Every structure is written in C-alpha cells, then in structure tokens.
Amino acid sequence: MSQEPVSAAVPLVQRPLWQRHLWLAAGGISLALGVIGIFLPLLPTTPFVLLAAFCFSRGSERCERWLVEHPRFGPMVLDWRANRAVPLRAKQLATVMMLIGSAWSAWVLPRLNWLPPLFCSVVALWLWQLPTAPARPPEPSRKE
C-alpha cells in the first residue's frame, strides 16, 4: 500500500531545520488529538488525522510515510488525497459523536455550556460541505 507522498510546496531538504521541527510538532499534536478523538466525542478524528498528514508532509517524510501506510489512518489520508473527499461513514460517525459530546458538555458545564456545541457545529458544517468519497468495495478476506 505504499504510495508516493504528495510533495510539499518546498522540498524538505530546502526547508530550514527549525521549520521542519515546527511542522513535525504540529503533526504530532494533530495526530495525538485525532487519537484522543477516537475516545472523546468532542474531538473528531478525521480532520486531525488529515491535518497531521499535511504537517508531516512538510516536516518529515518518514512520519508522513508511516501515517500513510498505517492500517487505520492510512486509507483515510489516501482517500482524501485521491478524491479530496471524506467517506460517508466517517462523516456520520463524527457528527453523531460530536452531538453526543455537545449534549453532554451542555449538561455538565456550569458556564459557557454553549461553547462546545458551537465549535462542534462549525466543524460539522465544514465536514458536511466537503465532498463525500465514493464507497470502496469490501476487501477480499485472506485465507492463509
């Protein structure tokens, strides 16, 4: 499943080391937020993983390759790069999780209980305005 990484505007070797470190740090933070988003309904996973791929493509070829070849996150990034679209299932799951998280935070937070639902609404609007990726055929099962 190896695919050539999408080249950044400026090749990595021409970027100053401090810029590559900043892009790498931003990618690591984005990926961490995406992983946390798997378990925390207020953080959607897909946008953070896509942001991590963008940052890694500008900071570290090795990290970008790792993310693109990852069994869980790689297909998401490759679909985005191929179609500039998000799978319908990811949109649905992200929306439901953000709704649950927004309802919970509105109930629990004594002040500013409107803030998480506002941000989740903005993210959901952005997510649903993106094109929807065509459904992929199921992968054939491997018998060993």
Image (cartoon, helix red, strand yellow):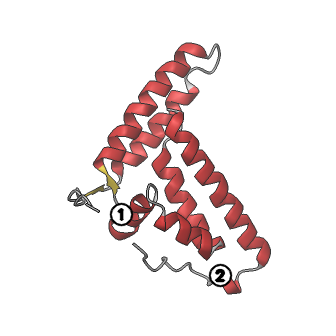
Q: Mark yes or no: residue 119 visible.
A: no
User: Which quadrant: the C terminus?
Assistant: bottom left
**Going 53% across and 51% down the picture, which residue do you hit?**
48
Nearest to the observer: residue 35 or residue 112: 35
Dot 2, crowdedness within 10 Å: few (<14), some or many (≥20)?
some
| Residue that extends furthest to the front in the rendered view of this protein | 144
Vertically, is 44 above or below 57?
Answer: above
Residue 31: image tag: none
Q: Which amino acid does label 1 sit on?
A: Asp
The N terminus lies in quadrant: bottom left
- Percent across and percent down for residue 37 are 53, 40
Q: How far apart are marks 1 and 2 (CA)?
A: 24 Å
Residue 38 spot, x, y in % from top left: 50, 40
Asked if residue 101 is positioned above or below residue 139 in the image, the reply reads above
Of 9 and 42, the residue lying toward us: 42
Provide the secondary structure element on which disc 2 rests. Answer: helix
Give me the residue at 49% from left, 35% from top. Answer: 120
| Horizontal and vertical percent position of residue 74 | 44, 62
121 displayed left or right of 43: left
Q: What element carries label 1?
A: helix
Residue 10, by quadrant, is bottom right
Judging depth in this view, the residue of 74 and 95 nearest the camera is: 74
Identify the residue shown where x is 65% and y is 57%: 28
Badge number at residue 79: 1
Q: What residue type is labelled 2?
A: Leu
User: Which residue in the protein does label 2 denote?
Assistant: 12
